[in-house]
Image (cartoon, rainbow, N blue to C red):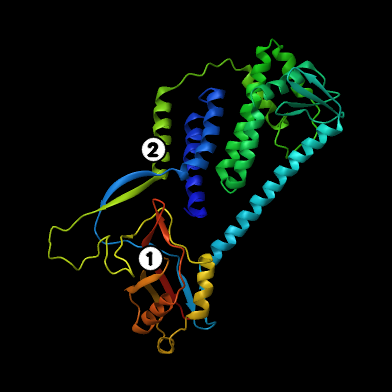
Amino acid sequence: MSAETYLLKSYVVLLILGGIYWLILRSRISISASRSWLLLSFAASLTVPFLNFQAITTTSSTIAALILPELIVDPNTGTASSILDFYILLRVVFTSVSGIFLFQFIFSIIRIAFLYLKHPTNHIGSNIVVSLDENKQAFSFFRLLFIPKDMSQNEIVLHEEQHARLWHSADIVFVRLARLLFWAHPLFWLLERELTHIHEYQADRAVLRRGVNTQNYMQLLLNITMGNTSGLPVNQFSKSIIKKRIIMMKQNKTFRLISLRWLIALPTALLAIWLVGCQSKSTDDKSKNDDSTTSKTVTTSDVSDNNSEVFDKVEKAPEYPGGQEAMGQFFSKTVKYPAVARENGVQGTVYVDFVVDKSGKVTNPSVIQSVSSELDAEALRVVGLMPKWTPGEQDGKTVSVKMTLPVKFKLQ
């Protein structure tokens, strides 16, 4: 499975599971259930693309070859430029942004370590309280409670203790790492913010269950002087959600599992997971006519050097040495736009079928969609000159795979 395929599948899973939460379950189920759904949505988005559910389908005996990205032949420059250049640029941009987020995460962990080493500490139970300078913001990171000297109220310490007890920091670290993959997903940012809000609601309710006066606690939240620890993967007080937190504390709402909503949400989520992880396993319809020998079947006898099964869909597709960019460079050096076709203004896309056998050798090239005899011949010539590929794999074994390459001859 290519990186692009994995990314697409993971984004689809997050879109479906996150959309179910946002449209159906949000504010209608308990806080703990909301937290669990969000975390499972992130985890499923990362893991479901690796699942492989087999769905047996019946297909005709003709092989539907794997279609490669189109290559464009430009006679004016004498080069073949692949439309994959755009995707290569996207890969570079995506990787660069992910790298920036990774650097920010590592740097934030270093900042937390620096604060821990710089300031005095004392123990409260299994937690370590780090005394920060005044006018800083209280926050927690696992068992480390960072409390400014001017915020020594028991309620503040108790609030951060609840974050530590409920392992909210583990959620935040997990989601920050997931951000490296999902930063381009608009719904991810909404779900990440929702999870941080849920952490605060959980901690507030845990504090109030300890007997803290609700009105005094609300007033304390309003009076807190905010510092600046933005960017750290920590649980911290936030001005932006204090109003929501106060509203949640005033609510005396008992959430019930609304059967109709769960009957919609759960089957939809399971169906989405199954569809993303499902790979069809084809069974060919065998012809009842024993005299028919002209149709191509999954098992062929014209593959180079061996009488082997030819696949049209495999777990690991064959790869050109160096990838699609290298294949584009090979075509740019090898393809020559036929002079006759150029003079007559002939252009179009030639579709060439070929088989990458078990050894990676390109065999049996043939034109399945023609433009002209000159362009067809040039496309076949270059395909036949391609070096050995990395062969495809099925069930851990190298197999022969049929491919289709569109070669676009374009005149400017």
Q: Is residue 349 above or below residue 256?
A: below
- Comparing 164 with 382, the one in front is 382
Q: Considering only order in the chain, which callout, 1 or 2, is on the residue closer to the N terminus?
A: 2
Which residue does the image show at 34% across and 59% down from the upper left? 312
Horizontal arrangement in the rendering, residue 35 relative to residue 107 (left or right): left
Residue 93 visible (yes or no):
yes
Disc 1 target residue? 357
* Secondary element at tag 2: helix
Q: Nearer the viewer, mark 2 or mark 1?
A: 1
Amino acid type at circle 2 is Leu
x and y percentages locating residue 336 in the rendered image: 47, 83
Residue density around tag 2, few if under 14, some if 14–19, many if 20 or more, within 10 Å: few
- Comparing 367 with 243, the one in front is 367
* Location of residue 172 by image quarter: top right
| Measured Cα–Cα span from mark 2 to mark 1 | 36 Å
x and y percentages locating residue 83 in the rendered image: 51, 67
- Comparing 111 with 288, the one in front is 288
Disc 2 target residue? 271
Residue 412 visible (yes or no):
no
Horizontal arrangement in the rendering, residue 339 relative to residue 206 (left or right): left
Horizontal arrangement in the rendering, residue 201 relative to residue 16 (left or right): right
Amino acid type at circle 1 is Asp
* Secondary element at tag 1: loop
x and y percentages locating residue 173 in the rendered image: 65, 36
Q: Is residue 369 above or below residue 136?
A: below
Asked if the residue at tag 1 contacts the one at tag 2, i.e. Cβ–Cβ closer than 8 Å, the answer is no
Q: Is residue 208 above or below residue 226?
A: above
Residue density around tag 1, few if under 14, some if 14–19, many if 20 or more, within 10 Å: many
